[in-house]
Image (cartoon, helix red, strand yellow):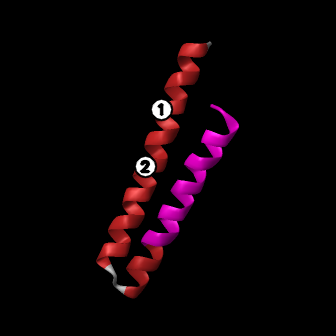
Amino acid sequence: MSGTEKSKAHTEQAKGKAKETVGRAVGNERMTAEGRADQTKGHARQAKEDIKDTFRH
């Protein structure tokens, strides 16, 4: 996995987790859903890069 894509994936996952946690704490369903969506995007980016790495080697 390239360094920048790996860091972007981890950043999206962390940002999403934080947003989801804050959303739950304040009772904001929209923020909670956005946090879950950000986490999913991060996981998808990471999976894409893992697949690319698999085919490179």
**Residue 40, numbered circle:** none
Vertical placement of 41 versus 22: above or below?
A: above
- Image quarter of the C terminus: top right
Location of residue 44 (image quadrant): top left
Give the secondary structure at mark 1: helix
**Residue 41, numbered circle:** 2
- Image quarter of the N terminus: top right
Report crowding for label 2: few under 14, some 14 to 19, many 20 or more residues within 10 A (C-alpha): some
User: Is residue 13 toward the left or the right of residue 37 in the image?
Assistant: right
Rendering coords of residue 28 (x, y %)? 34, 81
**Residue 48, numbered circle:** 1
Instruction: Decide which of tag 1 and tag 2 comes sooner along the chain.
Output: 2
Rendering coords of residue 37 (x, y %)? 37, 57
Rendering coords of residue 43 (x, y %)? 46, 45
Dot 2 amino acid type = Lys
User: Is residue 9 toward the left or the right of residue 21 in the image?
Assistant: right
* Residue drawn 38% across the image and 61% down it: 36
The magenta stretch is 1-20
Q: Specify the principal SS of the magenta part.
A: helix
* Residue drawn 43% across the image and 70% down it: 20
Vertical placement of 46 versus 29: above or below?
A: above
Report crowding for label 1: few under 14, some 14 to 19, many 20 or more residues within 10 A (C-alpha): some
* Residue drawn 56% across the image and 60% down it: 14
Dot 1 amino acid type = Lys
Give the secondary structure at mark 2: helix
Distance of label 1 from label 2 (alpha carbons):
10 Å
